[in-house]
């Protein structure tokens, strides 16, 4: 014994000795788990069919205590679970009770993400059945805070991270994703996350959240959805100096280096998943977003359509036809100009008036004031169509007084910009300037910026300052508000109304590209879902509790337009597109295993 110990002290490694007699107390250390094998290379073996312990660690197939006695026998689960067998409904009640105990929204978000990583079907069951309660948790406004703190709450990857390190190898990276039949990709570069600015790699919360809604609200299969973050660095000094930051620690790549990486990504996506894969760009900065949208032939999915739907529905409350209204936007970036263009397209379609003319009823204010023709030479190209003849106006209040809009829309990303003076002015000008066809002076005020802190005004401010006359909707949810004895319930102009059903419509029709008429069809379908009961409450959007029916209706309208335009590839066309859309929707109920 002494001689053996002496040899080891003299530099002979325990790895040189018989592993069966020295490592793990006499048990061979196959997986390299003992201290003595720390420096050995280990092969990460796994199983191709989930059973036993691996089945409980597979979120796609795990059912927790809902495995039946027969399933526990046939899948080697005996002893790996407590004896109780509970159904999915009881699991749902238990988890909702736990989530409601949390007082902080971010804690609820983390709990939901943990559930998604543990039991995918139960996650979607909770989200589908409790959509109004959980939508603000998994999406806006809580997802904004989640992105800000993503480095600290990151547990396991829920999508693909493609950084500058992967340049020249993006196709190989896509092949690392375990699913092969991808139909929808949501991608961000994290430069303009909601109204929070550059969050770099931590913007992954947006694609993850968007695709959770594609599944829960639109019924696309989780296996067909891929969240992607393109990491080209960040200009956020706080993140660059944060030891917990999970992205590249360098300033943002621009110009040729940036565009080459994005082009390689788009090329690899089509090569790996086919021409019909839907790629949705999210939260890119304006200077990149417009170039990407122009280059890759997509358009503004979601936000523009849902706002147009709200405006169309609001006509039942504020009166007049779409072409009789005058629109004023605060914010002339990607969102503002996209919404404005879709409204102009809808007016043109309804009135047969050229698009150049219908744009003249829509005015935009940016950081330098009203966009007018005398500024045209200094404007970015996407703002130029909105430079109308008018003397220069420096601020929003002056623009309201000059233009006298009946609809005020905020997409600026700057909070509390719809001041008391602005809302009072919009309300008073509605009173004195309405044509006789309008039933009463009710300004439509849409404060679209997210999260709540960036909203141009609150519901309380809109109703109070307009003396209860405003028809109000916002990007982030607000609680009902009582004013002069009446309870006002505001709508949420949430793009989650549109994009899940829109995506489903593209998938079921096999559409080869997106056309503006499809977006108009989606808007009209959503507006058509607002009931008299909703209007009586002052709402211009239907309740989210019925979102799956709404999504199926939108999908059917979008698919019908794709067939009409000759852009659909799934033939023959189903006789009843609404029923077909419903039959194609993912359902989160547990399946029985052989």
Image: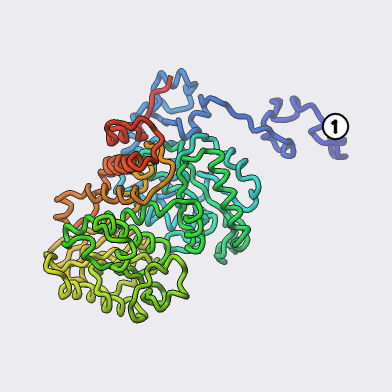
Q: From the image, which quarter does the N terminus lie in?
A: top right
| Image location of residue 108, percent across then percent down | 39, 50
Q: Is residue 110 left or right of residue 16?
A: left
Towards the viewer: 100 or 144? 144
- Residue at image position (18%, 63%) is 482
| Image location of residue 283, percent across then percent down | 46, 57
- Residue at image position (53%, 51%) is 229
Q: Is residue 56 visible?
A: yes
Disc 1 designates what residue? 4
Q: Is residue 96 above or below residue 356?
A: above
Q: From the image, which quarter does the C terminus lie in?
A: top left
- Residue at image position (36%, 63%) is 449
Instruction: Answer with the quarter of the image where residue 5 lies.
Output: top right
Q: Is residue 389 above or below residue 142?
A: below
| Image location of residue 442, percent across then percent down | 17, 66
Q: Is residue 128 visible?
A: no
Towards the viewer: 440 or 483? 440
| Image location of residue 174, percent across then percent down | 57, 41
Towards the viewer: 28 or 481? 481
Instruction: Answer with the quarter of the image where residue 422 lies.
Output: bottom left
Secondary structure of the residue carrying tag 1 is helix
- Residue at image position (19%, 75%) is 428
């Amino acid at each position: 014994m002494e001689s053996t110990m002496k040899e080891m002290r003299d530099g002979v490694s325990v790895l040189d000795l018989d592993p069966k007699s020295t490592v793990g107390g006499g048990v061979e250390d196959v997986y390299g788990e003992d201290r003595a094998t720390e420096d050995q290379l280990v092969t990460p073996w796994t199983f191709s069919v989930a059973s036993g312990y691996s089945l409980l660690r597979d979120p796609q197939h795990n059912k927790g205590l809902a495995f039946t006695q027969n399933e526990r026998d046939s899948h080697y689960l005996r002893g790996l679970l407590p004896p109780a067998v509970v159904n999915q409904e009881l699991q749902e009640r238990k988890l909702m009770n736990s989530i409601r105990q949390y007082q902080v929204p971010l804690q609820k978000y983390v709990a939901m993400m943990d559930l998604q990583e543990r039991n995918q079907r139960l996650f979607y069951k909770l989200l589908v059945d409790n959509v109004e309660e959980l939508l603000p948790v998994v999406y806006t406004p809580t997802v904004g805070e989640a992105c800000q703190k993503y480095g600290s709450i990151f547990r396991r990857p829920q999508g693909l991270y493609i950084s500058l390190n992967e340049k020249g190898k993006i196709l190989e990276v896509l092949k690392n994703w375990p699913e092969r039949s991808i139909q929808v990709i949501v991608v961000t570069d994290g430069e303009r996350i909601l109204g929070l600015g550059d969050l770099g790699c931590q913007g992954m919360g947006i694609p993850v959240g968007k695709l959770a809604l594609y599944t829960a609200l639109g019924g696309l299969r989780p296996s067909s959805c891929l969240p992607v973050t393109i990491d080209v660095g960040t200009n956020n000094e706080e993140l660059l100096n944060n030891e917990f930051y999970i992205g590249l620690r360098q300033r943002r790549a621009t110009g040729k280096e940036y565009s080459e990486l994005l082009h390689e990504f788009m090329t690899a996506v089509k090569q790996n998943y086919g021409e019909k894969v839907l790629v949705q760009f999210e939260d890119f900065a304006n200077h990149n977003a417009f170039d990407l949208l122009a280059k890759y032939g997509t358009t503004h999915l979601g936000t523009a359509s849902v706002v147009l739907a709200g405006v169309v529905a609001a006509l039942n409350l504020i009166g007049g036809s779409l072409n009789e209204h005058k629109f004023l936007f605060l914010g002339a970036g990607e969102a503002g100009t996209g919404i404005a263009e879709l409204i102009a397209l809808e007016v043109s379609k309804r009135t047969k008036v050229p698009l150049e003319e219908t744009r003249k009823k829509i005015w935009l204010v940016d950081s330098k004031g009203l966009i007018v023709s005398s500024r045209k030479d200094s404007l970015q190209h996407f703002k130029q169509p909105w430079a109308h003849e008018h003397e220069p106006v420096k601020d929003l209040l002056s623009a309201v007084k000059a233009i006298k809009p009946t609809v005020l829309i905020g997409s600026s990303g700057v909070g509390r910009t719809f001041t008391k003076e602005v809302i009072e002015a919009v309300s008073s000008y509605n009173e004195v300037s309405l044509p006789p066809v309008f039933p009463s002076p009710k300004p439509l005020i849409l404060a679209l910026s997210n999260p709540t802190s960036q909203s141009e005004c609150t519901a309380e401010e809109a109703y109070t300052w307009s003396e209860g006359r405003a028809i109000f909707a916002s990007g982030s949810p607000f609680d009902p508000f009582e004013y002069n004895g009446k309870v006002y319930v505001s709508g949420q102009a949430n793009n989650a109304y549109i994009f899940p059903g829109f995506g489903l419509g593209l998938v079921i029709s096999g559409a080869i590209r997106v056309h503006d008429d499809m977006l108009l069809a989606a808007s009209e379908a959503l507006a058509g879902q607002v009931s008299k009961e909703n209007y009586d409450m002052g709402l211009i959007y239907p309740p989210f509790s019925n979102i799956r029916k709404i999504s199926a209706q939108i999908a059917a309208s979008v698919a019908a337009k794709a067939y009409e335009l000759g852009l659909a590839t799934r033939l023959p066309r189903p006789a009843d597109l609404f029923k077909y859309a419903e039959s194609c929707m993912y359902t989160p109920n547990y399946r029985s295993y052989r």
